[in-house]
Image: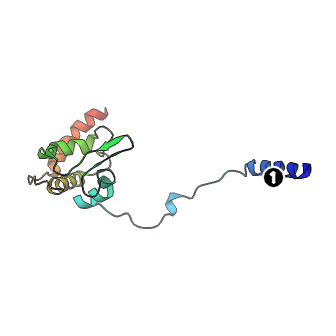
């Protein structure tokens, strides 16, 4: 029994000995094309719906609340969603450095005309670009 116990302890100690450094695969070896996000629906489905849900009804859980876009009166002012997307709000990150003006304009137009919303005044890239100085002042 004593020999078995010594063998067992030795085996466990061998498992704890580090083998040596392990290197991760290079990200450059990943093949395939990045899908461009050309439409507001594309941007919404790939970025927004993870939190705001596919139906735009938002969610509550894990100590967070993800606001609904469905029938949301705050979307009446076109500048509000542009500002929030660019600057973030509460737990939402800012996307000013990740999305181009045309992507922001198209996703704002998408959420303002879907999910029971009928705000038809179109947000343009010029409207989004006008918010860029606000973002730059905030970053400084």
Q: Is residue 78 left or right of residue 40?
A: left
Q: Could you tell me residue 129's position as x and y percent?
A: 19, 45
Residue 60: quarter of image: top left
Q: Residues within 10 Å of mark 1 (few under 14, many from 20)?
A: few
Residue placed under numbered mark 1 in the picture: 11
Q: Could you tell me residue 112's position as x and y percent?
A: 15, 52
Q: Nearer the viewer, residue 108 or 9?
A: 9
Residue 22, compared with residue 29, is above or below; it is above
Q: Could you tell me residue 97's position as x and y percent?
A: 32, 46
Q: Nearer the viewer, residue 32 or 14?
A: 14
State the residue at coordinates (28%, 58%).
54
State the residue at coordinates (29%, 41%).
88
State the residue at coordinates (20%, 45%).
82
Residue 32, compared with residue 120, is above or below; it is below
Q: Secondary structure at mark 1?
A: helix
Would residue 93 be seen by someone viewing this image from the given angle? no
What number of labels is visible? 1
Q: Is residue 30 left or right of residue 22?
A: left
Tell me, what colour scheme is on the image? Answer: rainbow
Would residue 60 be seen by someone viewing this image from the given angle? yes
Q: Quadrant of the C terminus?
A: top left
Q: Residue furthest left?
A: 121
Q: Nearer the viewer, residue 108 or 23?
A: 108
Q: Could you tell me residue 67's position as x and y percent?
A: 25, 45
Q: Residue furthest bottom?
A: 32
Residue 116: quarter of image: bottom left
């Amino acid at each position: 029994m004593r020999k078995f116990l010594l063998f067992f302890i030795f085996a466990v100690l061998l498992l704890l000995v580090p083998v040596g450094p392990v290197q991760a695969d290079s990200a450059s070896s990943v093949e395939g094309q990045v899908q461009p996000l050309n439409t507001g629906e594309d941007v919404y489905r790939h970025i927004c719906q993870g939190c705001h849900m596919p139906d735009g009804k938002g969610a509550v859980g894990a100590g967070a609340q993800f606001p609904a876009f469905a029938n949301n009166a705050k979307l009446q002012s076109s500048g509000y969603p542009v500002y929030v997307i660019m600057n973030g709000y509460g737990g939402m990150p800012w996307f000013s450095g990740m999305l181009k003006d045309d992507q922001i304009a198209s996703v704002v137009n998408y959420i303002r005309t879907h999910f029971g919303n009928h705000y038809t005044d179109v947000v343009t890239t010029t409207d989004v670009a006008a918010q860029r100085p606000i973002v730059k002042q905030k970053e400084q």
